[in-house]
Image: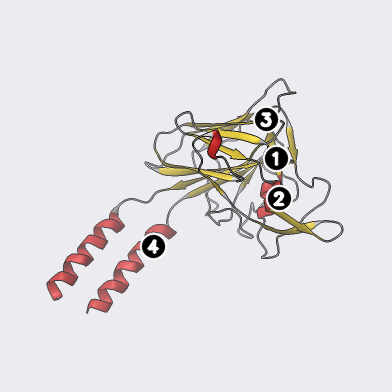
């Protein structure tokens, strides 16, 4: 009986995580994006990404972004930047060694460049219908170790750019894999190389993210990941009570 309860608890937790909605968007396509049922990409590994080039011809805003099931949502996005750039732009890198498209998603970005009229890159997502969610923001530059910040207006993370986290091989260069490194430093003195930040436990229908990279760099992609309803926690508590009663 105890084993059955434990199996039930873990099945419920897994189902809650599997049903979490994810909205993903790739800025500045340079080599493909997982806009269909396969392949997948992201730290939160999903399909049905949105792509500013494939879906909108790089024209802001984009409305009613699709989620990771392919269904349309109410989520809209608008963006602004000093331009666009990327890493290994002139090669069609194709799929990664594992069949995913992480390198293609990460290699292009909307640029924050002090030589442009707009010196920062930013995006605003609106009409987010989830009660609670995490926002993953992917950053990139074409040069290693530039200093940068990424902020949602409340929390600011500091980082050093890390194009060396994109791995290529062959001639012409083709994609191998991305070494994802989370950015967690809250001050410049603690900054290390990284390529994505997570703004956790957010609520509200609108969020604005801004990056500033000295010398050039910016936002490659983002993912909005719904935090499921706490029903699974209730199930876990009930399972614990049942186990205690059976002892």
Q: Neighbour class for label 3 at 10 Å: few (<14), some, many (≥20)?
A: some
Q: Secondary structure at mark 2?
A: helix
Work out whether residue 42 or residue 211 is closer to the camera in this orientation and state it. Answer: 211
Marked residue nearer the N-terminal end (1 or 3): 1
> Residues at badges 2 and 1 in contact (C-beta under 8 Å)?
no
Marked residue nearer the N-terminal end (2 or 1): 1
Q: Secondary structure at mark 4?
A: helix
Marked residue nearer the N-terminal end (4 or 1): 4
Disc 1 or disc 3, which is closer to the eye? 3
Q: Neighbour class for label 4 at 10 Å: few (<14), some, many (≥20)?
A: few
Left or right side of 204 for 75: right
Q: Position of residue 178 (x, y in %)?
A: 66, 55
Q: Position of residue 10 (x, y in %)?
A: 34, 68
Query: Where is mark 3, residue-wise?
Result: 214
Quadrant location of residue 11? bottom left
Q: Residue at x 82, y 56 (%)?
A: 173
Q: Residue at x 67, y 52 (%)?
A: 165
Q: Secondary structure at mark 1?
A: loop
Query: Where is mark 2, residue-wise?
Result: 164
Marked residue nearer the N-terminal end (4 or 2): 4
Disc 4 or disc 2, which is closer to the eye? 2
Query: Where is mark 1, residue-wise?
Result: 141
Q: CA distance from mark 4 to mark 1?
A: 37 Å
Q: Residue at x 51, y 40 (%)?
A: 185
Q: Position of residue 83 (x, y in %)?
A: 73, 30
Query: Where is mark 4, residue-wise?
Result: 15
Q: CA distance from mark 4 to mark 2?
A: 36 Å
Disc 2 or disc 1, which is closer to the eye? 2
Left or right side of 58 for 71: left
Q: Residue furthest front?
A: 189
């Amino acid at each position: 009986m105890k084993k059955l309860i434990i199996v039930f608890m873990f099945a419920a937790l897994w189902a809650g995580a599997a049903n979490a909605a994810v909205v993903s968007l790739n800025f500045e396509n340079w080599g493909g994006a997982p806009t269909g049922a396969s392949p997948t990409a992201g730290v939160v590994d999903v399909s049905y990404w949105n792509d500013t080039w494939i879906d909108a011809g790089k024209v802001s805003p984009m409305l009613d972004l699709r989620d990771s099931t392919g269904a349309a949502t109410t989520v809209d996005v608008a963006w602004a930047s000093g331009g666009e750039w990327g890493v290994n732009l002139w090669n069609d890198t194709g799929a990664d060694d594992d069949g995913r498209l992480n390198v293609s998603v990460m290699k292009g970005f909307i640029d924050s460049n002090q030589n442009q009229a707009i010196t920062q890159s930013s995006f605003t997502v609106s009409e987010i219908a989830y009660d609670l969610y995490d926002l993953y923001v992917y950053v990139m530059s074409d040069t290693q170790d530039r200093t940068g910040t990424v902020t949602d207006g409340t929390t600011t993370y500091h980082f050093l750019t890390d194009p060396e986290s994109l791995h290529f091989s062959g001639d012409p260069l083709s994609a191998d894999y991305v070494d994802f490194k989370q950015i967690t430093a809250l001050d410049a003195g603690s900054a290390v190389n990284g390529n994505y930040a997570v703004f956790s436990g957010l609520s509200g229908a609108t969020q604005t993210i801004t990056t500033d990279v000295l010398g050039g760099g910016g936002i490659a992609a983002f993912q909005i990941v719904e935090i499921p309803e706490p029903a699974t926690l209730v199930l876990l508590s009930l399972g614990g009570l049942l186990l205690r009663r059976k002892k």
